[in-house]
Amino acid sequence: MQVRDGMSATVLTVGPGHTLRDTARLMSERKVGAAVVIDPDGHGPGIITERDILHSLGAGHDPDDEAVSEHLTRDVVFAAPDWSLEEAATEMVRGSFRHLIVMEEGATVGILSVRDVVRCWTQDGAICPVPASSDAAA
């Protein structure tokens, strides 16, 4: 399977001036864990994740005063739609992140999450056997 088979083609985008609260609200409404940050003055898209928002809150920042630009990841690893899911998963593990922005010919065409990869693999039959509870106790 390829990234294009698992990615979501509908991508939540926000600007760098959005507050963390507004971004969290949008992410919650759409039931997504990340948003692509489009900065017209920046160099390519960035990403803000639920983890970024959580770190800010944990540090005591006010989500109504904190802008996305202060918490986003700018050094993003991008996936191509024709990557294998294994390649995408490897990049996620190497980089310790859970989302990849999917780019094709310089345009954002989707986003892939760890959940998407797991969903594809389990639908594809790529599941590992789970021992029965009596076997686990032995």
Image (cartoon, rainbow, N blue to C red):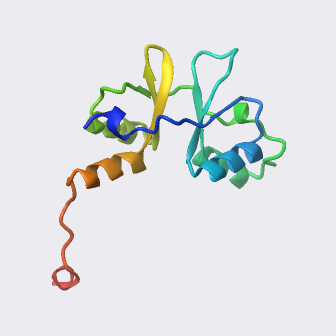
Residue 2 location in percent, x, y?
A: 28, 34
* Residue at 34% from the left image edge and 52% from the top image edge: 119
Residue drawn 55% across the image and 47% down it? 33
Examine the image and state in which quarter residue 104 appears.
top left
Image quadrant where residue 137 sits: bottom left
| Residue 77 on image: x %, y % | 45, 28
Residue 92 place in picture, x, y as percent: 39, 39
* Residue 95 to residue 38: above or below: below
Q: How many numbered marks are there?
A: 0
- The residue sitting at 76% across, 47% down in the picture is 21
21 relative to 96 in the view: left or right: right
Residue closest to the far front: 10
Compared across the picture, whether 81 is left or right of 27 comes to left
Residue 55 at x, y percent in the picture: 65, 49
Residue 119 seen: yes
Q: Is residue 66 left or right of residue 7?
A: right
